[in-house]
Image (tube, rainbow, N blue to C red):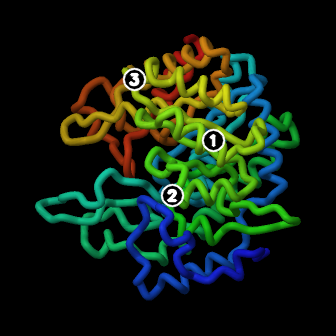
Amino acid sequence: MTGDGARRTPRQPWPAGVEAAQQPDWATHPAYEPSCTALASAPALVTPEELARLRRALAVVAGGGAVMLQLGDCAESFEETDADQVRAKTAVLHALADEVADGTGLPVLRVGRIGGQFAKPRTLPHEEVGGVLLPAFRGHMVNGESPTPEARAHDPRRMVRAYEASADVLRALTRERDQRARRLQEFEDGPWASHDALVVDYEARLVRTEDGRRFLGSTHLPWLGDRTRAPDSAHVRLLASVVNPVALKLGPSVATDELREVCALLDPYRMPGRLTLIVRMGAERVTGLLPPLVAAVRDAGHRPVWLSDPMHGNTVREAGRKTRRLTDVVDEASRCKRVLERAGEHPGGLHLEVAASDVTECLGGKVDGVDRLAERYTTLCDPRLNPDQAAELMRAWVRS
């Protein structure tokens, strides 16, 4: 299937004058046009039928009949896409989801940060490593993590490799989902794929049309981060144009007027299951900042899934490494849940960065001191919870 994307030329895929923040610097690379052309003619990685199933399940969550767990790596690696590695990651997702189901008595919709989470926004475009100023690592879709000028160069050929890696992961997820669907109700179905729809060159060239429905073929549930959610951005225009369920991260800088505007663009028909709002305020700020946003969204007629991302607003630096304290993560998740409940809204679940292995990237549990962080600090970007820490968080969130 090629759809209308096959006719798209490899020029900049957003109109002049429209903002597209956090984009790679590769438009003059000789491989830019061939890479874009290859993506424009590639098969979609998801189907409209899958998207419709996920939207129905999300509508159940929005209505209070289920909860959602969305988790996985901060940044996926091209080296971790075979079936065994995917199975290890989804095993953690299922184990944690089962624990939430037992604690809440509700079915759990399972969504991974997987099958396309290869690009990352960065606060600064450069970083100093060993006295050398280098482009920041932006995920394997853009450049390599090795601290050399060659590895950090932005290379559009990586978009094609990201597509191929995503295809491997999505095939594994599809097999698993089909096996689970034989014994589970639809709103428990999963795992589904999601990622930050950051690189517009990549995402726009994977838009397809089938039976009159325009959809993003790169993932089931794309989200926009706190740096790319501006109502007049190319990112919002792109996700507003497709039928996929979409998600939006809400950081402490979001204003009520801005939120109303972007929600109206992404969810003009106020359809439950279309919009997920992911709160990432920080433990100290969520209680004060979230209530007016909840009221604004409700008064505008939207019925989103409300998720807590208690990690991104609680990043600190210890012994030269980024980390998060489990106590802060638990505090924000619990406070977010209480705000939503007081407002009469359903706390829809959690969005987390969790590793499949026993990493030591966040403080808490067995990682009982700063000196333990270096033992197994393997993330490509931001610190992840290990499965035991994530389970402790789940239990605290259920009890709160």
The secondary element bearing badge 3 is classed as loop
Marks 1, 2: nearer the viewer: 1
Amino acid type of the residue that numbered disc 2 sits on in the rendered structure:
Leu
Mark 1 crowd level (few <14, some 14–19, many ≥20, 10 Å Cα): many
Can you say whether 236 is above or below 149 in the image?
A: above
Q: Given contact means CB atoms under 8 Å apart, are the residues at marks 3 and 1 in contact?
A: no
Q: Which residue is mark 2?
A: 198
Marks 2, 3: nearer the viewer: 3
Amino acid type of the residue that numbered disc 1 sits on in the rendered structure:
Cys
Q: Position of residue 336 (x, y in %)?
A: 52, 21
Amino acid type of the residue that numbered disc 3 sits on in the rendered structure:
Arg
The secondary element bearing badge 2 is classed as loop
Mark 2 crowd level (few <14, some 14–19, many ≥20, 10 Å Cα): many
The secondary element bearing badge 1 is classed as helix
Q: Which mark is residue 318?
A: none
Mark 3 crowd level (few <14, some 14–19, many ≥20, 10 Å Cα): some
Marks 3, 1: nearer the viewer: 1
Q: Which residue is mark 1?
A: 263
Asked whether residue 303 is in view, the answer is no
Q: Residue furthest left?
A: 131
Q: Which residue is mark 3?
A: 285
At horizontal 60% and vertical 16% (from top left) the residue drawn is: 398
From the viewer's perspective, is 243 left or right of 167?
Answer: right
Can you say whether 112 is above or below 19 in the image?
A: above
Q: Position of residue 121 (x, y in %)?
A: 41, 54
